[in-house]
């Protein structure tokens, strides 16, 4: 999905979470000795917690079932949902899964009013809910990749409302272990003012049939925590929860991703920085002052102040904590992870730090497993990536 994140004084367009076409050509990085990260110090100093999120029972430790029902068609992105997704999650000790679902393709719903979701596809979602229940897993139904509404919110909002009327009615009798997520990663023209209006109306529609169900609402800017402050949720409804995602520092988590812009193609970025041997970014990075600035800091700053270190993670969590302190609402971390082009110890370090920081702040989470470059579970083999499993659960 297209994702835009802020760097102070700059805006940049990035893409993450789903397979895309190959990036524009980029010059290869200069040959250099590749650094390897040491295991992160698990006693590293952390900032004081501004405010803790209240507990969200049943949604504390989870995993995304990405690139399954959110692909344009099943199997299009190389991953097909199976019983093993639920089995592996439950046996590892997860208490929930997040189910990204693309309802908006012509094969799955009518493109014109009344925007009926096709029964054949609804039965697939039913199956996933039944699988979760059989494994004692909670599950989040997430409306994902509804790209049209990000481009034309006024023209597409009726369609989203119709989706939620149907989803809410169909699952009204499901237990509270089923949660609803209104819309994944609002972006583009779906700016805060109209996003808040659409969110309020979607909540009103859902509450007609599901008066107490957990409803999650993503903030603007691809669910970037920096934009939680603009998210308005009903203070009187304790079961509406704010959601954000975490992929910072992006030049580490998405290094060499083939769907990214050329200036993201520098390999060998470790976490945390600095590397033992300075890393020279690819030639294309010279066109982006923020990338040049980031690598200067990454190569030279000590870990405590390094932009490729824990400080960046802590700062993003602080945005969530300030939202909790101001509103009293609960928050939830719906996605995080690092691509497998990063060396394994760095991925383990990053995943462990984000997970433990979320838990320290009372925030439930779901790791972004897309069955591909962010994969933690090998559902065909019935195994986990052991270093990521350790980072998530130990």
Image (cartoon, rainbow, N blue to C red):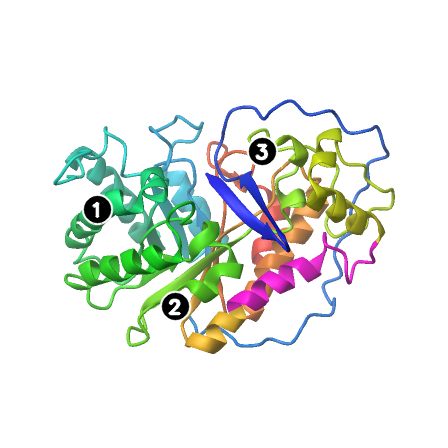
Q: Quadrant of residue 195?
A: bottom left
Rendered residue at 46%/38% (across/down): 1
> Between disc 2 and disc 1, whose residue precedes?
2
Rendered residue at 55%/40% (across/down): 14
Q: CA distance from mark 3 to mark 2?
A: 36 Å
Q: Residues within 10 Å of mark 3 (few under 14, many from 20)?
A: many
Instruction: Evaluate whether residue 91 shows in this view.
Output: no
Residue lying furthest front in this view? 9
Task: Find residue 260 and name its label.
Answer: 3
Where disc 2 sits, the SS reads loop
Task: Find residue 372 and name its label.
Answer: none
Please report the bounds of the magenta region as a residue range: 301-320
Q: Nearer the viewer, mark 2 or mark 1?
A: 1
Where disc 3 sits, the SS reads loop
Instruction: Evaluate whether residue 244 shows in this view.
Output: yes
**Residue receiving disc 1:** 163
Rendered residue at 56%/57% (across/down): 393
Image quadrant in which the C terminus is located: bottom right
Residue closest to the eye, 57 or 315: 315
The correct choice, above or below, for 80 with respect to 211 in the image is above
Residue 101: x and y in percent read: 33, 41
- The answer to whether marks 2 and 1 mark residues whose Cβ atoms lie closer than 8 Å is no
Residue closest to the eye, 148 or 65: 148
> Between disc 3 and disc 2, whose residue precedes?
2
Task: Find residue 57 and name its label.
Answer: 2
Q: CA distance from mark 2 to mark 1?
A: 26 Å
Q: Is residue 95 magenta?
A: no
The correct choice, above or below, for 10 with respect to 225 in the image is above
Residue closest to the eye, 128 or 151: 151
Residue 167: x and y in percent read: 20, 49
């Amino acid at each position: 999905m297209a994702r835009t994140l802020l760097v102070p004084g700059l805006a940049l367009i990035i893409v993450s979470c789903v397979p895309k076409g190959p990036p524009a050509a980029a010059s290869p990085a200069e040959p250099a000795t590749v650094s390897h990260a040491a295991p992160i110090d698990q006693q590293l100093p952390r900032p004081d917690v501004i405010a803790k999120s209240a507990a969200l029972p049943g949604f504390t430790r989870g995993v995304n079932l990405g690139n399954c029902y959110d692909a344009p068609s099943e199997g299009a992105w190389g991953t097909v949902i199976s019983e093993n997704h639920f089995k592996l999650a439950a046996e590892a000790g997860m208490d929930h899964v997040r189910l990204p679902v693309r309802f908006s393709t012509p094969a799955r719903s009518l493109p014109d009013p009344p925007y009926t979701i096709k029964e054949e596809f609804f039965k697939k979602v039913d199956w996933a809910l039944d699988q979760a229940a059989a494994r004692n897993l909670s599950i989040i139904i997430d409306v994902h990749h509804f790209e049209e509404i990000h481009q034309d919110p006024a023209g597409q909002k009726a369609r989203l409302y119709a989706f939620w009327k149907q989803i809410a009615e169909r699952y009204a009798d499901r237990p509270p272990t089923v949660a609803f997520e209104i819309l994944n990663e609002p972006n583009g023209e779906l700016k805060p003012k109209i996003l808040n209006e659409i969110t309020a109306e979607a909540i009103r529609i859902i509450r007609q049939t599901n008066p107490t169900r957990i409803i999650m609402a993503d903030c603007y800017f691809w669910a970037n925590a920096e934009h939680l402050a603009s998210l308005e949720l009903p203070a009187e409804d304790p079961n509406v929860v704010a959601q954000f995602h975490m992929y910072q520092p992006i030049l580490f988590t998405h290094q060499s991703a083939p769907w990214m812009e050329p200036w993201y193609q520098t390999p060998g970025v470790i976490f945390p920085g600095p590397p033992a041997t300075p890393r020279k970014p690819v030639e294309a990075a010279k066109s982006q002052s923020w990338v040049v600035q980031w690598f200067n800091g990454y190569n030279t700053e000590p870990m405590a102040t390094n932009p490729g270190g824990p400080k960046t993670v802590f700062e993003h969590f602080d945005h969530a904590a300030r939202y909790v302190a101001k509103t009293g609402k609960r928050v939830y971390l719906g996605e995080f992870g690092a691509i497998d082009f990063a060396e394994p110890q760095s991925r383990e370090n990053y995943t462990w730090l984000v997970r433990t920081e979320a838990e320290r702040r009372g925030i439930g989470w779901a790791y972004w497993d897309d069955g591909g470059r962010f994969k933690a579970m090998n559902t065909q083999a019935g195994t986990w990536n052991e270093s990521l499993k350790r980072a998530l659960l130990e």
